[in-house]
Image (cartoon, rainbow, N blue to C red):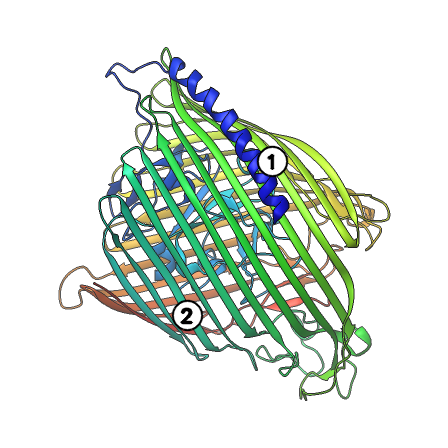
Amino acid sequence: MKNACTTAAGFGAAAVMFIWPVIGQAQDAVVEQSDGETVLRSIVVEGQGERQSGNASAAAGGESNDTQTQGYVVGATATGSKTDTPILEIPQSVSVVTRQQMDDQGAQTADEALRYTAGIFAQPFGPDSDTNWFYLRGFDITQTGVFLDGLQLYGYGFGAFYVDSFNLEQIDVLRGASSVLYGGSSPGGIVNYISKMPTGERLRYTEFGVNDAGTAYLGFDFGDSVNEYFDYRVSGRVLGGNGYFDFQEGFRGSISPSIRWSPDEETSLTILANITYVDEIHGAASFLPFTGTVEPASFGYIDRNANYTEPGLDDYLRQQYMVGYEFEHTFDNDWTVRQNARYGYADIHEFNLYPFGYSGFSATPVLPNPEFSRIVFEHDTKINTFQIDNQLEGEVQTGPVSHELLFGLDYQYFGLDQVQASAIGTPISVTRPIYGAPQPAPSPYIDQSVVQQQVGLYVQDQIRFGDGWIVTLNGRYDYVDTEATGTPEYSGEVDAWSGRAGIAYVFENGLTPYASASTFFDPLVGSSSEVDFFEPESGEQYEIGLKYQPTWFNGLFTVSWFDLTKKNVVTGPFGAETQIGAVNSRGFEFEAQANITNSLNLVAAFTAYDLEITEDSNTAIVGNTPYLIPEQLASIFLNYRVPTGRLEGLTIGGGIRYQGSSWVDNENTLKVPAATLFDAKIGYERENWGADLNVTNIADTRYVSGCQGVYTCSYGEGRSFEFRMFAKW
């Protein structure tokens, strides 16, 4: 961590040298409006027809301005621009999943919360208790596309952070290339978790929940004003019990305190922290062969609840800490300076056995006693991370044209120490597993330290003119230095330019057509016998769309068409990879979020992709579709609350999710069939208390969420019941 702090101090000093001269120039450049002052555009958060205002720092960091905001519609977010911008004016497709939507759908994890969001393929490997998996626009964003309050939660290997969704106010999704704002990140887009933060209002909330597997939890969310200068908030959850798979059990807890100091209306400092602890025995559902999951084997189908680890040896332990701050000050000329920073640490140990094909690592079972081959796997991973983002925002008027300018300098440090080890374990019966056989000690194949540092300089100009036109221009330069010592060892330095140009026109009736073009890069970690150091993935995206915000009810509708290409894809045999690969994703997305009335809420989404491997070292798969990813996704969820009468407070909700078919292999020889799933909710809320019962996959449909080859298929989540009670005072 010493290197991180030393480098951060240097970049902090550079940030001050960068920001203050610009402030001085800005003071001279600002032209007053006719009313005598230049006013920054204020954030608008809409819920149940209400509108609340806040600052861009809150939006950039992700704070919801009203902790009790109701409904599924949010009018503005800083995730798509790092400034306080209405979603209609962002030249890319953006979604916001509110706290109410998460609660109505009974989402207990972040990947469950995004199952009804356009463009998102969540839980591709079934329910995973230690990782939230996301694919966006056909590309994996799990390690380089997940952010918390605008700062990246970068992950590599098994070194990543886990965020408990109970501590989130909302989740923002920005679809498509986003490097111009956030530096190196996934081409599919980003998921930005939004923390619960102080609001200055008294908040007392507790929640108890239990599912039919035997897992129970207790959550709390308290906040208030200490005095006119200090507000606080603290949320957390403890959870424990049995899981849905044989032998699965565990305990986890998280607590997220925060405090805000506001000495005057122009200045605020919010300090946030989080502690997360997880101790559990793994579930199953993944690393299963195609024969026995997608297609029946000679013995039928593999039991969805069976667990082929060794319960006496299996262990997963996570200790995680984060602390950071968000600072904002607005000067007399209405220019605003912000600085957001966070330090994170995680210590993760994992030991388990998982199947890898049938006896002899075969793709088909051997009769009369079918057995799985098993791999013993263990890793010890520690990560230290530090991010800091310095911003200067202000408005300049040039005649009839308004320029909302953003200048930024950010720095990111990621340090990882990891040991990964494996061995061939003993086989185990598929249909009558017997546990307790001695296992060989795993041998290390990776023992290394990795340090990656990234610094970026960016600028944005949002140009408004002509009573509705908005042109968004972005440019960014990044420098990335990566060094790995130990086994394997490599190092490299890269730099990259990113850009975005977008145009939109906001009609008075709420219609907003838009178009944009953007580029991206995504730094890689690794090398091979053919490549000394992997260059970043790169590419470009073109997008056109139409957004509609009705004037007669509170809703937001988005239709988008995009063409996204990822280049420099690592391809080839293990240890001898090259980077000649390329994948193209073209598609159509539709999403509707609506508070149709004060009692009726709706969210609906439809996604259709055309994914194609356009270059690869294996020329036989060029023109094929990548495995795992379904090319069609659709969903709709409705929630109705009886507003008056004897049944006042009764809530009924339900949803349908459709997942199209996907390929098992890049050769496109085997397919995973499509699945349609039904969810339901019934609840009751009156005054300051309530209760809900959510049922996921009502019909208990047995389906496979996806495969990465014939040895690695995953069952999707079966039927589950979740009951919760809550009270606020």
Mark 1 or 2, nearer chain start: 2
Q: Amino acid at mark 1?
A: Val
Q: Which residue is mark 2?
A: 238
Displayed quadrant of residue 187:
top right
In this rendering, the answer to whether 103 lies above or below 703 is: above
Quadrant of the frame with the C terminus: bottom left
Task: Name the side, left or right, on which 358 lies relative to 720.
Answer: right
Q: Could you tell me which secondary element the residue under label 1 belongs to? A: strand
Task: Name the side, left or right, on which 266 lies relative to 23.
Answer: left
Q: CA distance from mark 1 to mark 2?
A: 37 Å
Q: Could you tell me which secondary element the residue under label 2 belongs to? A: strand
**Which residue occupies 63% across, 83% down?**
312
CA neighbours of label 2 inside 10 A, class few (<14), some (14 to 19), many (20+): some
Q: Amino acid at mark 2?
A: Val
In this rendering, the answer to whether 61 lies above or below 677 is: above
Picture coordinates of residue 262, whole percent (x, y): 30, 40
**Which residue occupies 55% across, 40% down?**
176
Do we see residue 306 in this rendering?
yes
In this rendering, the answer to whether 168 lies above or below 286 is: above
**Which residue occupies 62% across, 79% down?**
307
CA neighbours of label 1 inside 10 A, class few (<14), some (14 to 19), many (20+): many
Displayed quadrant of residue 208:
bottom left
Picture coordinates of residue 90, whole percent (x, y): 44, 33
The residue nearer to you, when weighing 531 against 175, is 531
Task: Name the side, left or right, on which 688 lies relative to 358.
Answer: left
**Which residue occupies 76% across, 43% down?**
491
Most distant residue in the left direction: 645
Picture coordinates of residue 331, whole percent (x, y): 34, 26
Residue 378's disc number: none
The residue nearer to you, when weighing 209 against 348, is 348
Q: Which residue is mark 1?
A: 455
